[in-house]
Every structure is written in structure tokens, then in C-alpha cells.
Image (tube, rainbow, N blue to C red):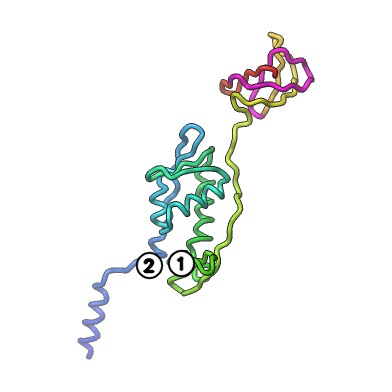
């Protein structure tokens, strides 16, 4: 009997360690880069694989939370607007808490199922299930204060050496031909060069 127990003990020690899904559940840090006025999430596909969710569902949630439009482009996700790594990582974490992790046992061994038209999160580990709630957008895309071709109201604060009216908006200095000091005018942005803006009265 002693030999049997010793052999059994040795056999168990020879077995490979089996990872639980929780141990494997490490979400990659978002890798992003800017492309014009858009933000590209380079490793979107890798993140989705770890979450074990449909790419379209993840994308729909992220665009709603970020308050922007976007699309899946191959392995990447493209969001309209400028976003930081921290902002995207925060929304991925929110997605995990709402659509992946079980609220009872905290494990990611879950799946989304519909019951009477209600989307439910069902845990394969402990059997718990709960409805998922619709979240409201919490972030808005950062938009430039001024854009070429658009018309704005400007308050003229001073007059330049060439007689142009000068207004200040956010980080921009706006030069408007024919505007007088202290008046409020409507002008169309003709050109933006760094923080210098040239506009025409309308």
C-alpha cells in the first residue's frame, strides 16, 4: 500500500501544471498611434482574443464609451479623434468588468447569452448569471477648437501692426482683416498654421 501511494504521489508530481483561465487572463496594454485626426489601436485583435468576445461587440462598446465613431481595419481598430492610451485602457477595463468578469467569483470564464431579449452574462465557473446594463458614453473625442473652412464668432482684443483685428481662442491667435478692437465679429477660418489662424469677415 505504501508503494502504491508513493508511486501515485510521484505520478502527480510529474503531471504538468494546468493554468486556470484566470491565470491566462492578462489583457495586453493598448498600443496606439495617431493617423491624421484618428487614433489607431494597433493590437485590437490581440485584445479581443484575450477577452474571448466578438470583435464587433467590443468595437461597438468602445466607440460608445469613447463618444466617437470608428471601424475595424484588419487587426486594428480606428477611432475618430485623439485618445490617450490611458483613456482606451480605461474603457477596455470597463468592458471587462461589465461583459467578461463574473461579478460573483471574479473569473473570466463567461459567455454572453440572451434570455427573453435581455443580454445576460453567464459564468461557466460558478453558474452565476446577471443582466448586463447599457452604459452611457463617458468620454468625448477631443476636437480642435478651430477648423479651416468653419465660421466662428470672435471677440477682437487688440489691433496688430498691420491693422488686423486680433482675437484669442484656446491656444490660437486669430488675425482678422478689417475687424475693430472690442467688437464681436463673425469670421470664416481661411488657414491655420500651428497656433496662428487667418480668418475673413463674413
Q: CA distance from mark 1 to mark 2?
A: 10 Å
**In this rendering, is residue 198 above or below 11?**
above
The picture places residue 61, in percent across and down from the top left corner, at 52, 52
Q: Which mark identifies residue 161?
A: none
Secondary element at tag 2: loop
- Give percent across and percent down for residue 121: 50, 66
Nearest the eye: 157 or 152:
152
- The residue at 63%/31% (across/down) is 145
Q: Earlier in the sequence, mark 1 or mark 2?
A: 2
Whether residues under marks 1 and 2 lie with C-beta atoms below 8 angstroms apart, the answer is yes
Give the numbered dot on residue 20.
Answer: 2
Q: Which residue is outermost to the top? A: 162
Q: Residues within 10 Å of mark 1 (few under 14, many from 20)?
A: some
- Residue at 42% x, 53% y: name it: 48
Over which residues does the magenta segment extend?
170-191
Quadrant (top left, top right, bottom left, bottom right) of the N terminus: bottom left
Q: Is residue 184 above or below residue 21?
A: above
Say which residue appears at 56% left-offset and 50% top-offset: 65
Residue 154: name its quadrant.
top right
In terms of secondary structure, where does tag 1 sit? Answer: loop
Q: Could you say where residue 54 lies in the image, as x and y percent from the top left? A: 43, 56
Q: Residue furthest bottom?
A: 1
Residue, disc 1: 107
138 vs 95, left or right, is right
Amino acid at each position: 500500500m505504501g508503494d502504491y501511494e508513493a508511486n501515485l504521489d510521484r505520478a502527480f508530481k510529474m503531471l504538468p501544471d494546468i493554468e486556470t483561465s484566470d491565470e491566462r487572463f492578462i489583457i495586453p496594454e493598448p498600443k496606439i498611434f495617431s493617423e491624421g485626426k484618428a487614433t489607431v489601436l494597433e493590437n485590437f485583435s490581440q485584445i479581443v482574443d484575450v477577452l474571448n468576445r466578438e470583435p464587433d461587440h467590443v468595437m461597438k462598446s468602445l466607440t460608445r464609451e469613447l463618444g466617437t465613431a470608428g471601424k475595424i481595419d484588419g487587426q486594428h481598430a480606428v477611432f475618430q479623434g485623439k485618445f490617450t492610451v490611458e483613456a482606451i485602457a480605461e474603457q477596455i477595463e470597463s468592458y471587462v468588468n461589465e461583459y467578461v468578469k463574473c461579478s460573483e467569483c471574479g473569473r473570466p470564464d463567461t459567455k454572453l447569452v440572451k434570455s427573453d431579449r435581455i443580454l445576460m452574462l453567464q459564468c461557466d465557473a460558478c453558474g452565476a448569471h446577471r443582466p448586463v446594463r447599457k452604459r452611457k458614453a463617458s468620454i468625448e473625442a477631443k476636437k480642435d477648437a478651430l477648423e479651416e473652412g468653419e465660421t466662428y464668432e470672435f471677440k477682437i482684443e487688440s489691433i496688430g501692426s498691420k491693422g488686423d483685428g486680433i482675437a484669442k481662442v484656446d491656444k490660437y491667435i486669430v488675425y482678422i482683416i478689417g475687424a475693430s478692437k472690442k467688437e464681436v465679429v463673425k469670421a470664416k477660418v481661411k488657414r491655420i498654421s500651428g497656433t496662428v489662424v487667418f480668418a475673413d469677415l463674413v
